[in-house]
Image (spheres, rainbow, N blue to C red):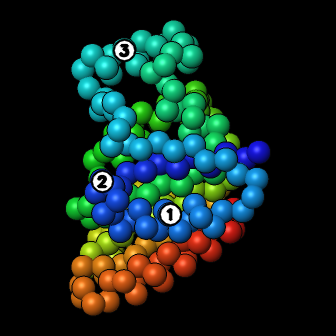
Amino acid sequence: MKTLLYVDCCIRREASRTRKLAEAFLSSMPEGWRVEKVTLMDEPLLPLMEGGFAQREELLQRGDFAHRRFDYAWQFQKADAILIAAPFYDLSIPALLKVYIENVSVDGITFECDARGLRGACRAQSMTFLTSRGGFYDDSPDEMGSRYMEALCRFFGTGVYRCVAADGVDMDPAQTPAILAEACERAAKAAREL
């Protein structure tokens, strides 16, 4: 059975419009997939700083990749597909998702770097990023969330990148349900393509 790692960074939880996209995706997945969910709002995530950074560097120098500090990285590395759901914040992604990415970005687990260069080491064949954005940013140079996630897809070597965005959800409240319904259809289609 294949494993989909679902990274939930829908800060507003049940009130999240991005979570609606995730629900549409998950309910349309083909048979033969098992979902592992990480709800970032419930995780004891810390950014890399001071003592935690020093501990991580010491573990890496010793080659102690089995330390629980690297559990997120191993889970990410072993998944057959990645689903990340996060709203559009300040032209990018929520800080909480960035902290998670810091924790999964581990040389020797999710990527490798040596004299030959940088190579992704993840098993996933695809990464799907679901997001909702208040304005219209699909073709905007100011949109950094999906662009960053696509770069991470290449960095981790995860194959195909897909982004499903519900754009303009704050522009006209009367249009929001239709915008979400159309984006949910695209999310469901992306799931069927796993």
Image point (53%, 68%), residue name: 24
Q: Badge 1 local density, few (<14 within 10 Å), some, or many (20+)? A: some
Q: Position of residue 113 (x, y in %)?
A: 56, 32
Q: Quadrant of residue 156?
A: top right
Image point (46%, 81%), residue name: 181
Q: Which mark is residue 136?
A: none
The residue type indicated by label 3 comes to Gln
Pick whichever of labels 3 and 2 is earlier in the sequence.
2
Q: Quadrant of the N terminus?
A: top right
In the image, farthest residue toward the top: 62
Q: Position of residue 192 (x, y in %)?
A: 68, 69
Q: Position of residue 145 (x, y in %)?
A: 37, 61
Above/below status of 126 relative to 171: above
Image point (37%, 51%), residue name: 9
The residue type indicated by label 2 comes to Ile
Residue named by callout 3: 55
Dot 1 falls on a residue whose secondary structure is helix
Residue named by callout 2: 11
Estimate the spatial distance between the alpha carbons at disc 2 and disc 1, rounded to whole Å.
15 Å
Residue named by callout 1: 23
Estimate the spatial distance between the alpha carbons at disc 1 and disc 3, rounded to whole Å.
37 Å
Above/below status of 60 relative to 104: above
**Residues at marks 2 and 1 touching, judged by CB atoms closer than 8 Å:** no
Dot 2 falls on a residue whose secondary structure is loop
